[in-house]
Image: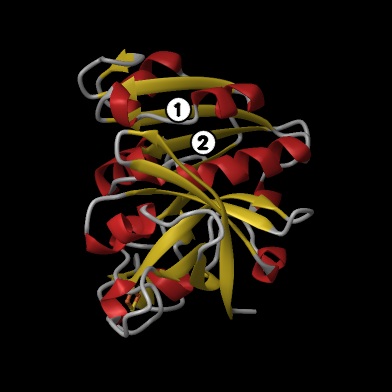
Amino acid sequence: MIQQERMTVVRQREIAKNIFEMTLQGQIVQEMTPGQFVHIRVSNLLDPLLRRPISIANIDKNANEFTIIYRAQGKGTNVLSQKQIGDEVDVLGPLGNGFPVEAAQQGETALLVGGGIGVPPLYELAKQLNARGVRTIHVFGFQTEEVAFYEEEFTKLGETHYVTDDGSKGFKGFVTDLLNELKPDFDVFYSCGPLPMLRALSSMYEDKKGYISLEERMGCGIGACFACVCKTQEGQEKDYVKICSDGPVFEKGVVKI
Ligand code: FES
Protein backbone atom coordinates (compact mmCIF):
# COMPACT_ATOMS: atom_id res chain seq x y z
CA MET A 1 0.00 0.00 0.00
CA ILE A 2 1.30 3.46 -0.92
CA GLN A 3 1.79 5.69 2.09
CA GLN A 4 3.16 9.12 2.82
CA GLU A 5 5.43 9.58 5.77
CA ARG A 6 7.85 12.07 7.24
CA MET A 7 10.97 9.95 7.53
CA THR A 8 14.13 10.79 9.46
CA VAL A 9 17.59 10.97 7.91
CA VAL A 10 19.82 8.58 9.87
CA ARG A 11 22.90 8.62 7.61
CA GLN A 12 24.12 10.55 4.60
CA ARG A 13 27.50 10.44 2.84
CA GLU A 14 29.03 11.09 -0.55
CA ILE A 15 30.16 7.70 -1.89
CA ALA A 16 31.49 8.86 -5.28
CA LYS A 17 31.72 12.18 -7.10
CA ASN A 18 28.29 13.85 -6.61
CA ILE A 19 26.76 10.47 -5.73
CA PHE A 20 25.11 10.37 -2.32
CA GLU A 21 23.93 7.50 -0.14
CA MET A 22 21.15 8.47 2.25
CA THR A 23 19.46 6.23 4.82
CA LEU A 24 16.00 7.09 6.11
CA GLN A 25 13.99 5.61 8.95
CA GLY A 26 10.23 5.11 9.09
CA GLN A 27 7.35 2.63 8.96
CA ILE A 28 6.83 2.42 5.20
CA VAL A 29 10.06 0.42 4.95
CA GLN A 30 7.98 -2.64 5.93
CA GLU A 31 6.18 -2.54 2.55
CA MET A 32 9.23 -2.16 0.29
CA THR A 33 10.51 -4.65 -2.30
CA PRO A 34 13.60 -4.44 -4.56
CA GLY A 35 13.15 -2.43 -7.75
CA GLN A 36 10.43 -0.20 -6.33
CA PHE A 37 11.00 3.51 -5.82
CA VAL A 38 9.93 6.34 -3.57
CA HIS A 39 8.87 9.87 -4.34
CA ILE A 40 10.71 12.30 -2.13
CA ARG A 41 9.78 15.88 -1.48
CA VAL A 42 13.12 17.55 -1.09
CA SER A 43 11.91 20.85 0.31
CA ASN A 44 8.96 22.18 2.27
CA LEU A 45 8.10 24.61 -0.50
CA LEU A 46 4.85 23.77 -2.27
CA ASP A 47 6.58 23.20 -5.58
CA PRO A 48 5.62 19.77 -6.99
CA LEU A 49 8.77 19.83 -9.08
CA LEU A 50 10.65 19.49 -5.86
CA ARG A 51 9.61 15.88 -5.53
CA ARG A 52 11.96 13.34 -7.03
CA PRO A 53 11.45 9.66 -7.86
CA ILE A 54 14.43 7.73 -6.49
CA SER A 55 14.92 3.97 -6.46
CA ILE A 56 15.34 1.91 -3.32
CA ALA A 57 18.88 0.56 -2.93
CA ASN A 58 18.78 -1.23 0.42
CA ILE A 59 16.02 -2.31 2.78
CA ASP A 60 16.53 -3.10 6.47
CA LYS A 61 13.13 -4.07 7.87
CA ASN A 62 14.53 -4.86 11.35
CA ALA A 63 15.82 -1.32 11.77
CA ASN A 64 12.93 0.27 9.80
CA GLU A 65 15.55 1.82 7.51
CA PHE A 66 16.03 2.04 3.78
CA THR A 67 18.77 3.54 1.65
CA ILE A 68 18.73 5.52 -1.56
CA ILE A 69 21.71 6.29 -3.78
CA TYR A 70 21.25 9.35 -5.98
CA ARG A 71 23.20 11.77 -8.08
CA ALA A 72 23.13 15.41 -6.94
CA GLN A 73 22.70 17.12 -10.28
CA GLY A 74 19.96 19.72 -10.01
CA LYS A 75 18.01 21.93 -7.64
CA GLY A 76 16.05 19.13 -5.97
CA THR A 77 18.79 16.57 -5.47
CA ASN A 78 21.26 19.27 -4.41
CA VAL A 79 18.87 20.25 -1.63
CA LEU A 80 18.55 16.59 -0.67
CA SER A 81 22.33 16.18 -0.50
CA GLN A 82 22.49 18.92 2.13
CA LYS A 83 20.13 17.18 4.56
CA GLN A 84 21.65 16.42 7.93
CA ILE A 85 21.17 13.53 10.35
CA GLY A 86 17.90 14.10 12.22
CA ASP A 87 16.28 16.15 9.43
CA GLU A 88 12.91 14.96 8.18
CA VAL A 89 12.03 14.21 4.57
CA ASP A 90 8.54 13.70 3.16
CA VAL A 91 8.45 10.31 1.42
CA LEU A 92 5.65 8.81 -0.69
CA GLY A 93 5.96 5.11 -1.38
CA PRO A 94 6.77 2.44 -2.02
CA LEU A 95 5.80 2.99 -5.66
CA GLY A 96 5.69 0.80 -8.75
CA ASN A 97 6.29 -2.88 -9.34
CA GLY A 98 9.77 -4.15 -8.55
CA PHE A 99 11.93 -7.08 -9.66
CA PRO A 100 10.38 -10.56 -9.31
CA VAL A 101 12.86 -12.22 -6.97
CA GLU A 102 10.92 -15.50 -7.28
CA ALA A 103 11.79 -15.73 -11.01
CA ALA A 104 15.13 -17.24 -9.94
CA GLN A 105 15.11 -20.52 -8.03
CA GLN A 106 17.48 -21.81 -5.37
CA GLY A 107 20.63 -23.19 -7.04
CA GLU A 108 20.17 -21.06 -10.17
CA THR A 109 22.36 -18.17 -11.33
CA ALA A 110 21.12 -14.63 -11.96
CA LEU A 111 23.01 -12.08 -14.04
CA LEU A 112 22.58 -8.51 -12.77
CA VAL A 113 23.55 -5.79 -15.25
CA GLY A 114 23.47 -2.11 -14.30
CA GLY A 115 24.51 1.19 -15.73
CA GLY A 116 25.34 4.32 -13.69
CA ILE A 117 22.55 5.39 -11.39
CA GLY A 118 20.64 2.26 -12.49
CA VAL A 119 22.95 0.15 -10.31
CA PRO A 120 21.44 0.98 -6.87
CA PRO A 121 18.17 -1.03 -7.11
CA LEU A 122 20.23 -4.09 -8.06
CA TYR A 123 21.88 -4.09 -4.63
CA GLU A 124 18.77 -5.00 -2.64
CA LEU A 125 17.87 -7.44 -5.41
CA ALA A 126 21.30 -9.13 -5.15
CA LYS A 127 20.90 -9.43 -1.38
CA GLN A 128 17.46 -11.00 -1.65
CA LEU A 129 18.52 -13.39 -4.43
CA ASN A 130 21.51 -14.56 -2.39
CA ALA A 131 19.23 -15.08 0.61
CA ARG A 132 17.14 -17.43 -1.58
CA GLY A 133 20.24 -19.44 -2.52
CA VAL A 134 20.58 -17.88 -5.99
CA ARG A 135 24.13 -17.18 -7.20
CA THR A 136 24.50 -13.65 -8.59
CA ILE A 137 26.96 -12.31 -11.17
CA HIS A 138 27.20 -8.51 -11.32
CA VAL A 139 28.30 -6.50 -14.36
CA PHE A 140 28.14 -2.72 -13.96
CA GLY A 141 29.02 0.11 -16.29
CA PHE A 142 30.00 3.63 -15.25
CA GLN A 143 31.39 6.62 -17.14
CA THR A 144 34.58 6.81 -15.09
CA GLU A 145 36.10 5.43 -11.89
CA GLU A 146 35.22 8.57 -9.92
CA VAL A 147 31.46 7.99 -10.26
CA ALA A 148 31.59 4.21 -9.60
CA PHE A 149 30.43 2.88 -6.23
CA TYR A 150 29.56 -0.17 -4.09
CA GLU A 151 32.31 -2.49 -5.34
CA GLU A 152 32.95 -3.89 -1.87
CA GLU A 153 29.25 -4.39 -1.16
CA PHE A 154 28.58 -6.26 -4.41
CA THR A 155 31.80 -8.29 -4.25
CA LYS A 156 30.65 -9.72 -0.91
CA LEU A 157 27.55 -11.08 -2.65
CA GLY A 158 29.04 -12.53 -5.84
CA GLU A 159 31.32 -12.26 -8.86
CA THR A 160 31.52 -8.54 -9.70
CA HIS A 161 32.86 -6.79 -12.81
CA TYR A 162 33.17 -3.07 -13.50
CA VAL A 163 33.24 -1.49 -16.93
CA THR A 164 34.02 2.17 -17.63
CA ASP A 165 33.79 4.25 -20.79
CA ASP A 166 37.41 5.37 -20.45
CA GLY A 167 38.90 2.24 -18.85
CA SER A 168 39.72 4.12 -15.61
CA LYS A 169 38.19 1.21 -13.69
CA GLY A 170 37.92 -2.38 -14.86
CA PHE A 171 37.16 -3.21 -18.46
CA LYS A 172 37.10 -0.38 -21.05
CA GLY A 173 33.98 -0.21 -23.21
CA PHE A 174 30.32 -1.13 -22.79
CA VAL A 175 28.88 -3.77 -20.47
CA THR A 176 27.77 -5.70 -23.54
CA ASP A 177 31.40 -5.84 -24.80
CA LEU A 178 32.47 -7.43 -21.54
CA LEU A 179 29.50 -9.81 -21.53
CA ASN A 180 30.51 -10.95 -25.02
CA GLU A 181 33.92 -11.85 -23.62
CA LEU A 182 32.77 -13.34 -20.33
CA LYS A 183 29.94 -15.39 -21.83
CA PRO A 184 28.42 -15.93 -18.36
CA ASP A 185 26.28 -18.98 -17.78
CA PHE A 186 23.04 -17.90 -16.10
CA ASP A 187 19.31 -18.67 -15.85
CA VAL A 188 17.73 -15.23 -15.59
CA PHE A 189 18.91 -11.65 -15.97
CA TYR A 190 17.82 -8.47 -14.26
CA SER A 191 18.88 -5.06 -15.49
CA CYS A 192 18.52 -1.36 -14.85
CA GLY A 193 20.24 1.49 -16.66
CA PRO A 194 20.26 3.49 -19.90
CA LEU A 195 17.82 2.42 -22.61
CA PRO A 196 20.50 1.52 -25.22
CA MET A 197 21.97 -0.91 -22.70
CA LEU A 198 18.57 -2.49 -21.94
CA ARG A 199 17.85 -2.74 -25.66
CA ALA A 200 21.18 -4.41 -26.37
CA LEU A 201 20.76 -6.88 -23.52
CA SER A 202 17.21 -7.78 -24.50
CA SER A 203 18.32 -8.76 -28.00
CA MET A 204 21.59 -10.36 -26.88
CA TYR A 205 19.74 -12.64 -24.47
CA GLU A 206 16.56 -13.08 -26.50
CA ASP A 207 16.18 -16.72 -25.46
CA LYS A 208 16.68 -16.07 -21.73
CA LYS A 209 14.22 -15.07 -19.05
CA GLY A 210 14.92 -11.41 -18.22
CA TYR A 211 13.54 -8.36 -16.44
CA ILE A 212 14.40 -4.75 -17.13
CA SER A 213 13.74 -1.62 -15.10
CA LEU A 214 12.84 1.37 -17.24
CA GLU A 215 13.26 3.94 -14.50
CA GLU A 216 15.26 6.16 -16.85
CA ARG A 217 12.00 6.97 -18.66
CA MET A 218 10.33 8.26 -15.50
CA GLY A 219 9.12 11.84 -15.01
CA CYS A 220 6.87 12.74 -12.08
CA GLY A 221 6.74 9.17 -10.77
CA ILE A 222 3.12 9.36 -9.63
CA GLY A 223 0.99 9.03 -12.76
CA ALA A 224 0.46 12.75 -13.31
CA CYS A 225 2.68 13.86 -16.18
CA PHE A 226 2.32 11.08 -18.79
CA ALA A 227 6.01 11.48 -19.62
CA CYS A 228 6.52 7.80 -18.96
CA VAL A 229 3.89 6.35 -21.30
CA CYS A 230 5.39 3.65 -23.56
CA LYS A 231 3.96 1.53 -26.35
CA THR A 232 3.99 -2.21 -25.77
CA GLN A 233 5.11 -4.89 -28.21
CA GLU A 234 2.53 -6.59 -30.44
CA GLY A 235 0.33 -9.16 -28.72
CA GLN A 236 0.41 -7.64 -25.22
CA GLU A 237 -2.74 -7.19 -23.15
CA LYS A 238 -2.47 -3.38 -23.17
CA ASP A 239 -1.29 -1.17 -26.05
CA TYR A 240 0.42 1.30 -23.71
CA VAL A 241 1.88 1.17 -20.21
CA LYS A 242 2.93 3.79 -17.72
CA ILE A 243 6.45 3.16 -16.50
CA CYS A 244 5.76 4.70 -13.08
CA SER A 245 2.68 2.67 -12.19
CA ASP A 246 2.78 -0.45 -14.43
CA GLY A 247 6.57 -0.70 -14.02
CA PRO A 248 9.29 0.40 -13.65
CA VAL A 249 10.20 -3.30 -13.97
CA PHE A 250 8.87 -5.28 -16.95
CA GLU A 251 9.65 -8.66 -18.36
CA LYS A 252 11.85 -8.17 -21.42
CA GLY A 253 9.91 -7.99 -24.68
CA VAL A 254 6.79 -6.42 -23.15
CA VAL A 255 7.57 -2.74 -23.78
CA LYS A 256 8.89 -1.25 -27.02
CA ILE A 257 12.17 0.36 -26.01
FE1 FES B 1 4.62 10.96 -14.69
FE2 FES B 1 4.49 8.30 -15.03
S1 FES B 1 6.20 9.50 -14.58
S2 FES B 1 2.92 9.76 -15.32
Residues packed near mark 2 inside 10 Å, few (<14), some (14 to 19) or many (20 plus): many
Q: Specify whether 114 is left or right of 32.
A: left
Q: Amino acid at mark 1?
A: Val
Closer to the camera, 173 or 94? 94
Label 1 beta carbon within 8 A of ligand 1: no
In percent of the image, x 20 and y 19: which residue is there? 166
Reading the image, the residue beneath label 2 is 112
Q: Quadrant of ligand 1?
A: bottom left
* Residue at x 43% of width, y 30% of height: 149
Quarter of the view holding residue 186: top right
Q: Is the C-beta separation of discs 2 and 1 under 8 Å?
A: yes
At horizontal 53% and vertical 54% (from top left) the residue drawn is 85
Where in the figure is residue 184, as x and y percent of width and height?
Answer: 51, 21
Q: Nearer the viewer, residue 117 or 51?
A: 51
Q: Amino acid at mark 2?
A: Leu
The answer to whether residue 94 is visible is yes
The residue at which mark 1 appears reads as 139
Q: How many marks?
A: 2
Q: Nearer the viewer, residue 214 or 118?
A: 118
